[in-house]
Amino acid sequence: MMLKLRSSVSVVDLGDNVLELFKTNTRKAIHLRTNDHTIEKLLLSMDGNTATEDIGLANSVDVDSPEFLHLVEYLKKHAILANDALVVNRPDYAKYRRVIHFIEDYSESDEMLLEMWENIRNSTVVIIGLGAVGTWVAVTLVQSGVKSLIMIDNDHVELSNLHRQYGYSEQDIGRMKTSALAERLRQIEPEVSVREVNQFLDETTLESQIREHVDLVINCADKPTVDQTSEWVGKYCMKYRIPHIVGGGYNLHLSLIGPTILPYKTACYKCIDMQLQKINDIEGENIKRLHTKNRKIGSFGPMCSLIASFVGMEAVKVLTKHITPDNINRRGEFDIYDMQLHYNTFDKLDDCPWCGEQL
């Protein structure tokens, strides 16, 4: 038997014969009361390469004793020890081991860890809009192990895109964004499958273009408006019970982050929109409507990639099918002026026409 202390676990001697086993990814810990430093030495010896019998001999511990076996089972139950053989021997482990080590703290067993990683690898994600947020979302997902994307956009690469959108160069100007970005993603992960849909989103696009099973839809499209595209995406995803994320936006020096929607489990887009309408009616009574014709607001690359990072983290959680995402029932606002992130929370409404209890 080969035992291994999980890569994300730190062993900390708190004194008074108390040992802390701290999971650095989830910031959770368990405490063990010990009589000496034997357990600490045992744990630090568990590297996945040394036989348990040899670890026992080196530390004068009977590894067949009920006490030792009980300790091992306890530590496995609390995801402190791992069986790296389940993932280390995979051909993709060397490339993605940091991602695997990140999600392992969320798993209750080695088998669950492997299942979560397989779920990510075998998932298909739709990304709508390959602009300042969508391009960064795409690369984040591919770097996190996703191998199948459907990318929807009918734009061509322009010079003005290059300061904030990932993957395009001056040599790509005039090319379809889907084609240029797909080529770049294959340089990162040669196995990635990208289906290019060269079409702007409208209310019929998803029904006409999505024929295969989809695990997640991410909306980063803002034409004609983010609200309109989010409504189209929301209707489609609620119909087919597909998790979906509003990829955020940028305006008035605010990055809008989320929400993440799990159909019929969390507030849907219509729930949130109904509540936002009430807020806007109250707060907007004395606000002048901005003249929007030909208005071109500023856009800042780091802000766009910040939104995409939040979306990417949420997407990975959703795709594992075991980790509960955090941006459910809320939307974040990150203010570039004071570097503060604030959240507005929303309820799942009983009278919602999309997901209410009467349905």
Image (spheres, rainbow, N blue to C red):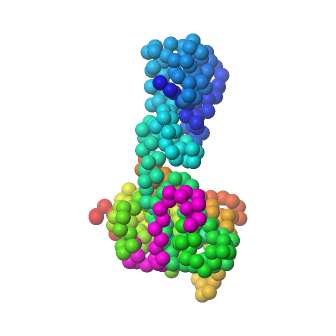
Is 334 positioned to the left or the right of 281 in the image?
right
Quarter where residue 333 is shown? bottom right
Seen at 46% across and 73% down, the residue is 197
Seen at 38% across and 66% down, the residue is 237
Query: Residue 322: x, y in percent?
Result: 43, 47
The residue stretch that appears in magenta? 183-206
* Nearest to the observer: residue 213 or residue 78: 213
- The C terminus - image quarter: bottom left
Seen at 54% across and 53% down, the residue is 144
* Nearest to the observer: residue 88 or residue 301: 88
Residue 286, compared with residue 253, is above or below; it is below
Query: Residue 109: x, y in percent?
Result: 44, 36
Quarter where residue 44 is shown? top right
Seen at 66% across and 75% down, the residue is 171
Taking the image as drawn, is residue 204 in sight? Answer: yes
Quarter where residue 111 is shown? top left
Residue 184 part of the magenta segment: yes
Residue 129 part of the magenta segment: no
Query: Residue 178: x, y in percent?
Result: 53, 72
